[in-house]
Amino acid sequence: MILRWAMRTLLAGLSLHAVNTATMAREHAGVVLPTISAGATPLGAARPILAWTEFCKAHVAECEVDSTFPSRIALSPSVWSLIVSVNRRVNRNVRNQTDQEHWGVPDRWDLAEDGAGDCEDFQLLKRRLLAEAGLPRRAMRLTVVIDEKGEGHAVLTLITDRGDYVLDNKTDSVMAWHQTGYVFIKRESQDAVAWVSLGGVTSPVVTANR
């Protein structure tokens, strides 16, 4: 697939394999890793978002689950720096636009390849970039929450050896899931092309506009 503007711009310099391990260790020696905390606990099967189902038909590789890949990201200073950098760069380089404005439909999931998108598009692009940099896709799960406005919203949950951390287009801070103030509804399964419940009692039909 030929990468468009957003992918060409944001991939530059983000690969974990572009610098040798010794150099990376020196560069990130001052980075403080987040405090270890408990991750969210899946509580059984949940109904997928319809727009996600359509996205997976068009982008099969983005939704595949390979059980041979790690189910957790091993956080190191260099990996944490990469995560924070990707979250910030995507947030600052992708233009926030509703699906109705962008595509003329209420909800469509895409990779923000033309430089515009709404919440789930930001997170899908972040996952693509992090996977390209060597992080296990299986440990990065699209997640549906209810936000501070009581609306559906999509974030990217990184399941790590120090807990679950959230990448969000509303903030450049990477926070533990329980610090976001969101109600966590459901996320992609780590074991199948499916979704699992996170215990939230209200499930939006679509994700938020922004």
Image (cartoon, rainbow, N blue to C red):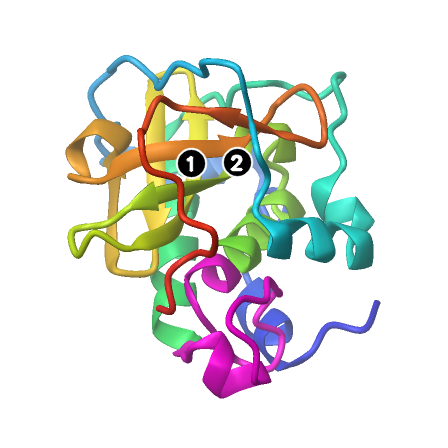
Front-lying residue, 153 or 7? 153
| Picture quadrant of residue 47 | top right
- Amino acid type at image mark 1: Thr
Place of residue 69 in the rendered image (x, y in percent of width and height, measured from the top left): 70, 21
Q: What is the crowding at mark 1: few (fewer than 14 residues within 10 Å), some, or many (at least 20)?
A: many
User: Which one is nearer the viewer's eye here, 165 or 210?
Assistant: 210
Crowd class of label 2 (few under 14; some 14 to 19; many from 20; radius 10 Å): many
Residue at left offset 72%, top offset 56%: 54
Q: Which mark is residue 157?
A: 1
Magenta segment? 95-122
Q: Secondary structure at mark 2?
A: strand
Residue 41 colored in magenta in the image: no
Q: Position of residue 155 (x, y in %)?
A: 39, 47
Q: How many marks?
A: 2
Query: Where in the figure is residue 122, as x and y percent of width and height?
Result: 47, 62
- The residue lying at 53 percent from left, 66 percent from top is 107
Answer with the quarter of the image where residue 188 lies. Answer: top right
Residue at 33 percent of width and 37 percent of height: 202
Q: Is residue 12 visible?
A: no
Secondary structure of the residue carrying tag 1 is: strand
CB-based contact (under 8 Å), mark 1 and mark 2: yes
**Which residue is painted at 40% across and 48% down in the image?**
204
* Circle number at residue 141: 2
**Chain-order first, disc 1 or disc 2:** 2
Residue 190: tell me if it is visible: yes
Quarter containing the N terminus: bottom right
